[in-house]
Amino acid sequence: MSRNMSLKKNPMPVQDPQVRAHNFKEVATGYTEEMALDEAARCLGCKNHPCVGACPVNINIPAFIEKIVEKDYEGAYQIIHETSSLPAVCGRVCPQETQCEGKCVRGIKGEPVGIGRLERFVADWHNAHDTGVAIKPETNGHKVAIIGAGPSGLTCAGDLAKAGYEVTIFEALHKAGGVLVYGIPEFRLPKSIVQKEVDNLQAMGVKVETNMVIGKVLTIDELFDDYGFDAVFIGSGAGLPRFMNIPGESLNGVYSANEFLTRTNLMKAYKPGSDTPIQQSKNVAIVGGGNVAMDAARCALRLGAEHVYIVYRRGEEEMPARNEEIEHAKEEGIIFKTLNNPVEILGDENLHVKGMKCIRMELGEPDASGRRRPVEVPGSEFVIDVDCVVMSIGTSPNPLIKSTTEGLDTQKWGGIIADENGQTSREGVFAGGDAVTGAATVISAMGAGKAAAKAIDEYIQSKAK
């Protein structure tokens, strides 16, 4: 086979920025077959395949790419699906540049192979051509409860279902998917893709109970004692928003990014007649520099705002958001006000936001995160004219499960303490994803769900002997 030795990866086709800024259709339109074949030919199939070790779920990347070269796209999908429950999701939202592609040998003297783009191509091909129905495995008679239908919960449920467990997912919201449906916007991850993955799990026998807030409707004790579950996996995420505790955060027009994105993505607030509207804003400030901040800013633009500002206390180089998300936001007209930090949100006589007072920052010595610490510049205060502020400065795990469960050790900041296999301080209770680590990536949560499924299987089988 002839290798493609181009130093550049095939660019991803996207909607025109001026068009996409006013719709919620997917920004990236995906590789054509010709592009996928050309990109797959850039893979050297190197002997040590460092890309695999850098993938949190250890997808056999060279093998699935080789199947693309052979035009066996279903074979490529099956290789990915051996270790990943959500290929179409990961191909879209994984930070490949810091994981698999970050270790690609082709990246030493040029751009790495577009692994994520190829994964998306394969998953989309499978979804477009698949006519089969998932087969329900024969039950082994053991029951496992999953708390939370996000990436870690769905992954754990899928692996356990394949092994014959009777799995029930308890989801607090009215729709399964977790952050995949309430957090990540439609233009980055179409919700039909998430729903297809949930449908596949249900076809394998997984039960999904929505509107079930564990800790309120049922406790973990009741799941064991009254419902007869052999083990419980907590994948409840990190949905408790943080605020800056500055004056004015209680004004009308101040949102957490969680609320803003949930109203937009899950409740479809952008549609006329929505039951969960968002106020029509002219000028919006998003405080923060991560992927969630970029999502909120790009949603605000699509909801009709004339000016959207990203206000971040460090410089652009220190932003934790993916480069691709920053570039897309800039192309769409988002205004970046880096090295600035809010000190007060200003309100009018009706307690509505009318502006945000900021102070300029400069970077000092590195802090514990390794990034240079932002320091205020005295006397540099100024006001941004905004009528809406979205706080996107991080989240913490919801304390509800901790407060209703005896014997479950947690960190001071609220994260559940669990080992690398997800085992918590309480026998039979496992945990993973953002509920343990705090807000992180979809693929890392999936990796935790996968590790916990293996540990749960070993735990239950050992007790059954």
Image: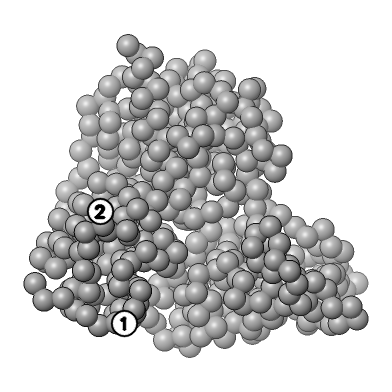
Residue 435 image-quadrant placement: top right
Rendered residue at 51%/34% (across/down): 419
Residue 167 or residue 461, whichever sits in front: 461
* Residue appearing at x 40%, y 28% in the figure: 456
Q: How many marks?
A: 2
Which amino acid lies under the numbered mark 2 shown in the image of this protein?
A: Asn
Name which residue lies at 34% across and 19% down.
461
Q: Residues within 10 Å of mark 1 (few under 14, many from 20)?
A: some
Q: Which mark is residue 8?
A: 1
Please state the horizontal and vertical placement of residue 118, each as a whole percent of the image. 27, 67
Q: Nearer the viewer, residue 6 or 365?
A: 365
Q: Determine whether, in the image, residue 325 is placed left or right of residue 72.
A: right
- Which SS class for mark 2? loop
User: Up-down: is 53 above or below 406?
Assistant: below
Q: State the mark number for residue 119.
A: none
User: For this view, does 284 lie left or right of residue 448?
Assistant: right
Tell whether label 2 touches label 1 (CB within 8 Å). no
* Residue 340 appears anywhere in the view: no
Q: Residue at x 32, y 27 (%)?
A: 165
Quarter of the image for the N terminus: give it. Answer: bottom left
Q: From what the image shows, is residue 316 above or below residue 63? A: below
* x and y, in percent, of residue 79 in the image: 21, 52
Q: From this view, report whether residue 168 is shown above or below residue 390.
A: above
Residues packed near mark 2 inside 10 Å, few (<14), some (14 to 19) or many (20 plus)? some
Q: Residue 57's spot in the image, x, y percent?
A: 36, 49
Mark 1 → mark 2, Cα distance in angstroms:
23 Å
Is residue 43 among what the camera can see? yes
Query: Residue 136 location, x and y as percent?
Result: 23, 34
Res 261 → quadrant? bottom right
Q: Quadrant of residue 213?
A: top right
Q: Earlier in the sequence, mark 1 or mark 2?
A: 1
| Residue wearing tag 2 | 60
